[in-house]
């Protein structure tokens, strides 16, 4: 007969218990919180466990500059977007939760489409994503939260394989928001995501008929049965995080369209240069950058 002490020792931990044990600094900040946008710590803990596997063991993500994420206060994380599914955002969330000396929540502003699909809407809200509106962004920043914005928008994740690592023009809204709220920008360049689901053809017409932002054709989608089309290739990832950029302009400059557009292009070109440098240094898709990894 197994006694109670032995049973407790053998009983698997719940994800929320694992999060509390592994990361008490993160857990203590958000346990018991009533979040108006729907964040649920237990749901986050479950998916943190899932995505941490991909982060640590499958993609084996390497980070350069994780300490550049501010330990406190508001900031806008911005970068290139890729991968058909927003795995790049998930990897960044996991890194800030587990690697940063002062772990904290990162909340991405997600496109409306995520909030129109039943099931997906609830998942997005409970894991911390927020519908991309100016009001929501300003609310989060006023509370000194970290928010994530991919200025390429849905075009980024919908790139074909031929377009990989070619950064589309950034929508300047993130710069306008940064100036208006006096918030620093933290650029992030990500290599790896563009190759986990090689997208050879993007049928926009068919996507519109299905009310999808795009309809890709990959090695597995739509040919193989669920869930096989959604299992990515084990490509090695690298993320380079810059130091926060304080733009230094007064809030009224947020309405200067030429200034806002110029800064958006400068951030875009900075990230493109980083991508080009990382790609030159990469040894292969599956071995990454360092032979010892």
Image (cartoon, rainbow, N blue to C red):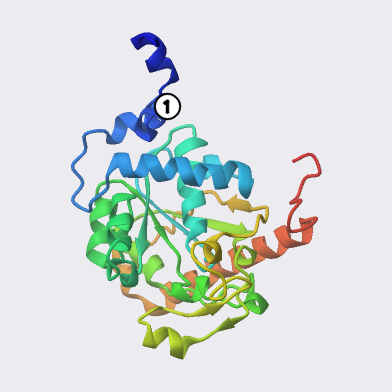
Dot 1 falls on a residue whose secondary structure is loop
The residue lying furthest to the bottom in this view is 205
Tell me if residue 213 comes above or below residue 68 in the rendering.
below
Quadrant of the image occupied by residue 177: bottom left
Say left or right for 10 vs 74: right
- Counting from the top left corner in percent of width and height, residue 249 is at 38, 62
Say left or right for 231 vs 258: right
- Counting from the top left corner in percent of width and height, residue 128 is at 32, 51
Tell me if residue 67 comes above or below residue 135 in the rendering.
above
Q: Nearer the viewer, residue 177 or 213?
A: 213
- Counting from the top left corner in percent of width and height, residue 227 is at 50, 61
Determine if residue 106 is in view.
yes
- Counting from the top left corner in percent of width and height, residue 284 is at 78, 57
Question: Which residue is found at the position 68% from the left and 53% from the top?
Answer: 236
Question: Which residue is found at the position 67% from the left and 78% from the top?
Answer: 162
Question: Which residue is found at the position 56% from the left and 70% from the top?
Answer: 224
Say left or right for 119 vs 104: left
Tell me if residue 161 comes above or below residue 247 in the rendering.
below
Question: Which residue is found at the position 52% from the left and 75% from the top?
Answer: 158
Q: Nearer the viewer, residue 159 or 223?
A: 223
Q: Label 1: which residue?
A: 12
Label 1: how many Cα within 10 Å (few below 14, some 14–19, many 20+): few
């Amino acid at each position: 007969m197994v006694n109670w002490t032995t049973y407790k020792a053998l009983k698997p931990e719940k994800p929320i218990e694992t999060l509390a044990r592994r990361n008490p600094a993160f857990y203590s900040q958000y346990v018991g919180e009533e979040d108006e946008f729907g964040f649920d710590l237990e749901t986050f803990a479950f998916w943190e466990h899932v995505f941490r596997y991909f982060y640590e063991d499958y993609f084996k993500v390497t980070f350069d500059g994780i300490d550049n994420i501010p330990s406190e206060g508001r900031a806008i994380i911005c970068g290139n977007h890729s991968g058909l599914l927003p795995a790049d955002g998930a990897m960044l969330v996991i890194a800030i939760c587990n690697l940063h000396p002062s772990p904290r929540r990162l909340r991405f502003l997600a496109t409306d489409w995520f909030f129109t699909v039943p099931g997906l809407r609830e998942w997005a809200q409970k894991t911390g994503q927020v519908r991309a509106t100016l009001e929501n962004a300003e609310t989060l920043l006023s509370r000194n939260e970290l928010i994530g914005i991919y200025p390429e928008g849905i075009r980024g994740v919908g790139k074909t394989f031929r377009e990989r690592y070619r950064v589309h023009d950034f929508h300047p809204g993130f710069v306008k928001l940064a100036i208006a709220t006096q918030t620093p920008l933290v650029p992030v360049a990500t290599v790896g995501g563009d190759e986990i689901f090689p997208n050879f053809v993007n049928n926009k017409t068919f996507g519109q008929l299905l009310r999808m932002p795009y309809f890709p054709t990959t090695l597995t989608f739509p040919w193989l049965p669920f869930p096989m089309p959604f299992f990515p290739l084990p490509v090695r990832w690298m993320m380079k995080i810059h130091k926060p950029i304080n733009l230094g302009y007064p809030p009224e400059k947020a309405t200067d369209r030429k200034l806002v557009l110029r800064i958006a292009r400068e951030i875009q070109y900075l990230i493109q240069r980083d991508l080009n440098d990382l790609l030159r240094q990469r040894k292969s898709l599956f071995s990454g950058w360092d032979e010892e990894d």
